[in-house]
Image (tube, rainbow, N blue to C red):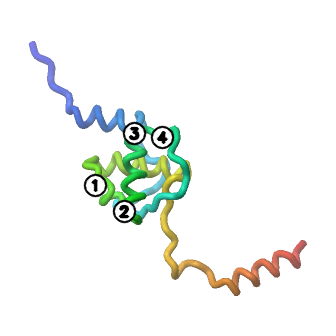
Amino acid sequence: MTRPRRDPDLVRAYVVTGGVLRPSRDVGLVTLLVAQDVPGQGLAPEQRRVLGVCSRHGALSIAEIAAHLDLPPSVVTILAAALMDSGHLAVPTPVADVPDIDVLKEVLRGLRQLV
């Protein structure tokens, strides 16, 4: 009697994510990520690979990172979410969403008046 073969990629994905089954945050396939200037000590090898790709190529989506590393997007999503939690990756803020400096100064003045 022969045993059914297990899918090696399924086992590998489980190992690569450290047994994590779901990302810790909502990250879509088109979410752009950029590497932050944070030391990578203590990261798992696959996390270092994700961080390295983002460092070399700038802002990349989850789908692009998965393609570069030949990993399933679901695995990259879990790894990227963990790297975002640790401060190694971030979602870039569009320039249009950055408030004007004069608005920030007004907010600061208002806050100082409250104290």
The amino acid on which the numbered mark 1 sits, given as a three-letter code, is His
Q: Earlier in the sequence, mark 3 or mark 1?
A: 3
Q: Are marks 3 and 2 in contact (CB under 8 Å)?
A: no
Q: Is residue 103 left or right of residue 15?
A: right
Residue behind mark 3: 45
Q: How far is mark 1 from mark 2, CA to CA?
A: 10 Å
Label 3: element kind: helix
Near-viewer residue (102 or 56): 56
Q: Are marks 1 and 2 in contact (CB under 8 Å)?
A: yes
Residue behind mark 2: 57
Label 1: element kind: helix
The amino acid on which the numbered mark 4 sits, given as a three-letter code, is Leu
Residue behind mark 4: 43
Which residue does the image show at 33% across and 48% down from the upper left?
Answer: 74
Position of the C terminus by quadrant: bottom right
Vertical position of residue 49 compared to residue 3: above or below: below
